[in-house]
Amino acid sequence: MSRRNTLTILSLGVFGLFAAFLYSKMATQVATKTTAIVIGSGLAGLSAASELISHKIPVVMLERAAKPGGNSIKASSGINGAPTKYQPEKDDAFYTDSIRSAGKAMGEMTKHREDLISTLVNSSASAISWLTETHGIDLSRVAQLGGHSVPRTHRPSSKLPPGFAIVSNLLKSLQSSPLFELQTSCTVTELLKSGSRVTGVSYLASSGNPGTLHGPVIVAGGGFGGDTTGLLAKYRPDLANYPSTNEEQPGVQPLLTTIGAHLIDMPLIQVHPTGFIDPASPSAPVKFLAAEMLRGEGGILLLPTGERFVNELETREHITKAIESQGSTSETPKQWNIQIVLDEDTYQAAKSHVDFYMSKGLIRKSVISALGDNALSSIQEYAKAVEKKDPSLDEFHRPSFGHWSLTEPTLESTVYVGTVTPVIHFTMGGVVTNTDAQVLDEQQKPIEGVWAAGEVAGGVHGGNRLGGSSLLECVVFGRRAGETCAAYLQSQQK
Ligand SMILES: Cc1cc2nc3c(=O)[nH]c(=O)nc-3n(C[C@H](O)[C@H](O)[C@H](O)COP(=O)(O)OP(=O)(O)OC[C@H]3O[C@@H](n4cnc5c(N)ncnc54)[C@H](O)[C@@H]3O)c2cc1C
Ligand SMILES: *[C@@H]1O[C@H](CO)[C@@H](O)[C@H](O)[C@H]1NC(C)=O
């Protein structure tokens, strides 16, 4: 409001204030005339939409699947943040841990990546307080995952998985706003442009009818880990037929490259060594993740013939390579039948997880004689190192043995066993964005009217994503996309 307006109001006293109040009401109503479009209902889309709604901007969210939540709703370990009041110790190493994990990819576009990483890290404490305080989500339990030098991965203290807890809460609060509209079973097929500016989308609705919507667009369509025959085959032909933990669907990146977006790190794919092969549908392309925790608590890995072959606590990459160096048991999908084996005490330590896997038929109670001809002798060998608590006695130098206590194994000893294989898990690459989540073109210039956040964007993780940092990137950059998009719309109203 101009100085002159202010003076006028002062001179009009109470009536003037009332007029100013009406004026401000009118202004917000004008600002609500244009709608923002959000593609995808995972955590990045939900974070962006929440931010837009808090700025009183109406949002239409378009989701390809019949149910909202994307891969975000399946997240099982948690979300990173530092420093937070839930962490048991002081933490100033998140930035250095992230740079280390990104690895040699940092050598290229160094400054750009450093800016993204420091934005991610600097905004992480406020991301956690936004979820816990603004939205009342319980994230009070903190764990230390691989690659982190201190505990900083937050999840609920109840059994509720973090992805579900966060997604269902944000979705519920959005759905209580009259400014929010969600259309499921609706696939965006094209971004519309006017000159160099993005002005809306074309979509195909569940009815089969095409349609268009106009407004600025936030693309939160996720990664391409479920696009095994498309983008994965293109950038990593060696991984073409691998199963995935991601829902099967084409990547959304081509929508953006068509309008001039630049891509980064597309061949950098995180393969997780242990996805469950379900005996009821062994060739299903989408697998349940066999959580890292199963090995951490004491689980071991055996070949189909019963031999151990790797230190089960090595990095994801190392274990995956050790599995891949064995002959595969199926080509489509590309699979290895590796056994993950828990003794009774390991089972007890991981009981809540394992009971869930058992209810799904992914782990069964069995005996050592069923694990292959060489299982008894290799478990006996392993038990010697466990009994003496001496990693140097273990052929593979496993540094700790978790809760494994079976030191006198026989053919009849009880074990809990599942079959696992390496699975595509996360795509580090994607569209190049800046710290405001604006989509950049080949010249590193923002393309007007379009933002991208979450796994669809690339560069922030470099060669290796730290566990817990992808939910974080969804919140941090999703919120930034929402904020800058709100400012963009408001500036257009003036
Ligand atoms: C089993 C599993 C466990 C995980 N655990 C963790 C964890 O503990 N911590 C962590 O940080 N990360 C974890 N991750 C990774 C993390 O969940 C994902 O990286 C993150 O959820 C991606 O969120 P997003 O919002 O970018 O995309 P998503 O949540 O995948 O959502 C994208 C949505 O966009 C929709 N969409 C795509 N294209 C279109 C289109 N053209 N039109 C309309 N809609 C479209 C999709 O249907 C989807 O619903 C896990 C991943 C998996 C698979
Ligand atoms: C993040 O915080 C550090 C330490 O305060 C600061 O040096 C850095 O510039 C910040 N980065 C960004 C992108 O704000």
Image (cartoon, helix red, strand yellow):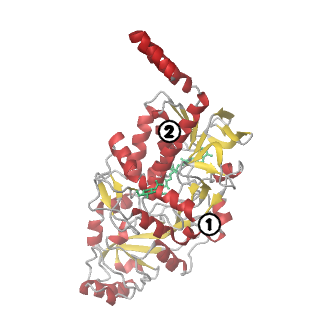
Name the residue located 37 percent from the left edge and 61 percent from the top edge: 358
Q: Residue at x 31, y 58 (%)?
A: 142
Is 373 displayed left or right of 427 in the figure?
A: left
Image coordinates for residue 259, horizontal then vertical, percent:
71, 48
365 or 120: nearer the viewer: 120
**Nearer the N terminus, badge 2 or badge 1?**
2
Residue 182 vertical position relative to residue 316 in the rendered view, above or below: above
Residue at the spot of label 2: 49
For numbered disc 2, what is the local secondary structure?
A: helix
Specify the label residue 267 is tagged with.
Answer: 1
Q: CA distance from mark 2 to mark 1?
A: 30 Å
At label 2, counting other C-alpha atoms closer than 10 Å, the crowd grade (few under 14, some 14-19, many 20 or more) is many
Is residue 224 visible from the viewing direction of this image?
yes
| Residue 443 sits above or below residue 62 on the image | below
Residue 273 appearing in the image: no
Answer yes or no: disc 2 within 8 Å of ligand 1: no
Q: Nearer the viewer, residue 433 or 321?
A: 433
162 relative to 375, above or below: above
Residue type beneath disc 1? Pro
